Image (spheres, helix red, strand yellow):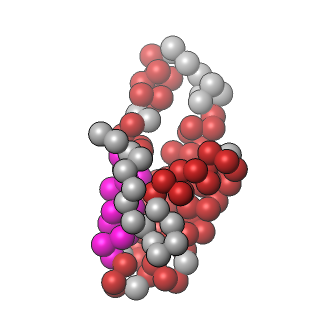
Amino acid sequence: MCLTAPLRLTGLFTLRRWQRLGRSFGSGLHATLHSHRSLHPRFASPKNAKQNAERIRYLKRLLANTDYIAVKIAEGAATAADYADKIAQRQAWREEIQQLETIS
């Protein structure tokens, strides 16, 4: 499954643009940008419910694609410190999903 397909998220940003922002600014700012985007009043309107649902599906795919981290840590093949940045990113994705679900 290709996660870089250009889904239309807003009038200004495509999924690829969000991903490029994340790569250019680092994962911490990427999570901040995503969180800020989900809190914007524009995304609270009913007409954007479909966009919110698409974003939720995308974030859940990202979580599913990084589930291997928990398995590696549980089996002792890696430590939480090895994947600290990914673990923080996963938490940011879960928080954004919760925010989107409450405004949808």
Is residue 83 found left or right of 42 in the rendered image? right
Q: Nearer the viewer, residue 75 or 8?
A: 8
| Residue occupying the point 68% across, 54% down | 29
In the displayed structure, 45 sits above or below 82; it is below
The answer to whether any part of residue 101 appears in the image is no
Q: Is residue 71 left or right of residue 17?
A: left
Q: Which residues are magenta?
A: 49-61
Residue 40 position in % (x across, y down) = 55, 78
Quadrant in which the C terminus appears: bottom left
Which residue: 34% across, 84% down? 46
Which residue lies at the image location 41% right of the left edge and 47% below the top edge? 4
Residue 89: percent from left, percent from top: 56, 46
Whether the magenta-drawn stretch holds residue 35 is answered as no
Residue 47 lies left or right of residue 24; in this view the side is left
Describe residue 47's horizontal placement relative to residue 89 as left or right.
left
Quadrant location, the N terminus:
top left
Classify 4 as above or below 12: above
Q: How many marks?
A: 0
